[in-house]
Image (cartoon, helix red, strand yellow):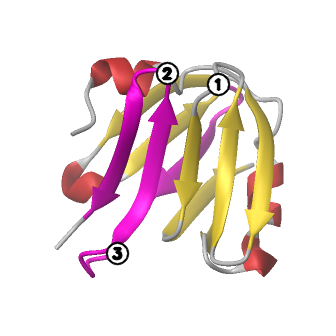
Amino acid sequence: MINEADLEELESVLTGVTVGVGSQILIFGSGATVLVQCPFISETQGKKQQGHGEHVHTSQLFYDYLNSQVIRASIEEQGVLVLEFEEDKLLRIVPEYDGLESYVISSRLGICPVAVV
């Protein structure tokens, strides 16, 4: 289960994005990562766009967040991971209801897979 300490590990600069077949990985300056295999919603410059961690062609939506500071990380209902970045940028990672891992937070504190049934 994800706790506040795990979320605090994400409150750093997004330093990299690794794009692969079937997933994408967000890499943070703290050493934490989020492996994304589910839908996500990008909110930048007043517009919302949807992507999916399994679809390589939506990876460019993550690039707007590179080198930006996460000022707050939180979990909403149904396991939605919300990353609030500086400059009013918001990223929501939305789990799928299929019982499989939707995203995985990894940090020096451990590994936290998220699956919703």
Contact check, label 3 and label 2, Cβ < 8 Å: no
Q: Type of residue at label 1? A: Gly
The image's mark for residue 86 is none
- Residue extending furthest left? 117
Label total for image: 3
**Callout in the foreground (3, 1):** 1
- Report which residue position mark 3 lands on: 96
- The picture places residue 15, in percent across and down from the top left corner, at 80, 32
Q: Which residues are magenta?
A: 86-115
As helix, strand or loop, the secondary structure at mark 2 comes to loop
As helix, strand or loop, the secondary structure at mark 3 comes to loop
Relative placement, left or right, of 95 versus 25 is left
Q: Magenta stretch containing residue 114, yes or no?
A: yes
The residue that appears at 78% across and 49% down in the rendered structure is 17
- Report which residue position mark 2 lands on: 108
Q: Type of residue at label 3? A: Glu
**Callout in the foreground (3, 2):** 2
Q: Is residue 5 above or below residue 1?
A: above
Q: Is residue 29 above or below residue 65?
A: above
Q: Main secondary structure of the magenta part?
A: strand
Q: Nearer the viewer, residue 93 or 37?
A: 37
- Report which residue position mark 1 lands on: 31
- The picture places residue 91, in percent across and down from the top left corner, at 56, 49
